Amino acid sequence: MSKPIQDFSFGYFLLKNYSKFFIRKFYKTTTVIGLENIPEGSPVIITPNHQNTLMDALCIIYNVHNRAVFMARADIFGKSKLITNTLRFLKILPLYRIRDGVKQLKNNDTSFEEAVGVLEDRQKLVVLPEGSHLGERRLRQLKKGVARIAFMAEERNNFELGLQIVPAGLDYSHYINFGARFMVQYGKPIKVLDYKELYQENPQRAMAALMDDIRNAIKPLMLNLDNEAEYEALETINNIYINDLYNGQQHKRKFKQQQILEESQQMGEKLLKFAETASPLYADTRLWALDFKALLKKLDLRYWAVAHDHYSVAGIAVNRLLQVICLPFFAVGYLTNILPFWLPVRLTRGIKDPQFLSSVRFVISVVTFTLFYLIYLIIMLIAMPKFWMALVASVAIPYLGMVAFRYYVWFKKTTAKARVNRFCRKKNADWLKLISCRDNVLKVVKEL
């Protein structure tokens, strides 16, 4: 019989802390709010929204103290014993859904028993209540698995366990890109004991009430554009507004991600009400937004680039001159880091689900960067006469890689600014229409 999944594992301890180091490097900024809302020394179920596959779990592990056991959809376990054992080592339990087959649902009994054991041991359990990921900033219908586990645990302990459920909201500035920004907010805990009387009267009503309260607690912690039919238009309008509000600089460190989220939420609420009107003005705004998004892709531009109609020619020239001067540093950093940077991208080209890209690339990067830097260290130790020289050179290589990456982003942005100026100078028809769509959208939303 295998030991309880929540038990301490030295291998897991090392891997968790090693991965935390890479999380800090993968994201430009990581913001954690409300960590004090997670009770220590008490059984807790954490319920975050689910938008970015494995990265959602990693970003919870990154900031939660001690160990946390996750429940994940059963289909990722596959039929391989190696995969099953690996996921168990990572403290992940399978959660079966109807889509896995009605006969498979009975397997939840074993998983739920183990989940209750985690809570009885006063450890943390993380359940993604939406059941599957979706790369959209909206909260979908929650599954009842959380409520079943919670009431099972409390009922078994005569409602004296003290179980609390902590809602969490995850927010990414970009789901895939290296160097994006990440934030998690933890809300006030919900005490399962408060539902005791209702559960004893009517278990189904109690579970429904608990899930409704969990959903309502998650919504303020994320951007929830809760209109599936109009989601694409609403997200684009919101992005246009935020991009204009911050002059295309919303991804810079000087702006707090929490503030940007709050402003997005405020506009999001207005847009949801606006969409409900189904007015001719909304229909026009929706069309402008969708045309804007299509033209942005056609012209190969990002939102930040169209925050201005043109850029300083002198500024672009100065940047190009500095880029020529800094080119040797880029070349060294690029050549010494090209393989570990390139391999994760190359090996994930066949992945169709964009939300899996960041997760798989992250895992591959942890392996490739570790191996390559270890190889570099061995080479330096052999090639250099002094140990300290080899150590300094080995530490310098990854930092040169970061310099090369930042140079690459700097170069790409300068090129985009030059392209904007060229579109403006030549009065490109698509560019003029794009700017017209942007201005029309902004004129409407600023009056909402």
Image (tube, rainbow, N blue to C red):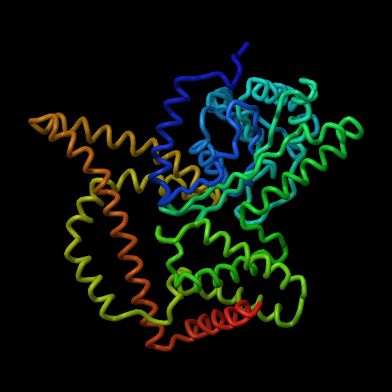
User: Which residue occupies the foreground of this view, 248 or 337?
Assistant: 248
Work out whether 306 lies above or below 222.
Answer: below
Instruction: Quadrant for residue 107, please give it.
Output: top right
Q: In the image shown, does 42 or 316 lie closer to the viewer?
A: 42
Residue 24 drawn above or below residue 418: above
Count of numbered labels shown in the rendering: 0
Write the residue at 53% across / 24% down. Answer: 89
Residue sitting at the far top: 1
Q: Report if residue 144 is visible in the image.
A: yes
Q: In this view, does 334 lie to the left or right of 133?
A: left
Q: In which quarter of the image is the N terminus?
A: top right
User: Residue 419 location, x and y as percent?
Assistant: 37, 77
Percent x, y of residue 355: 55, 50
Q: Position of 393 compared to 444: left or right?
A: left
* Drawn side of residue 354 relative to residue 154, left or right: left
Q: Which residue lies furthest to the left in this view?
A: 385
Residue drawn at the location 56% of the way across and 23% of the way down: 85
Q: In which quarter of the image is the C terminus?
A: bottom right
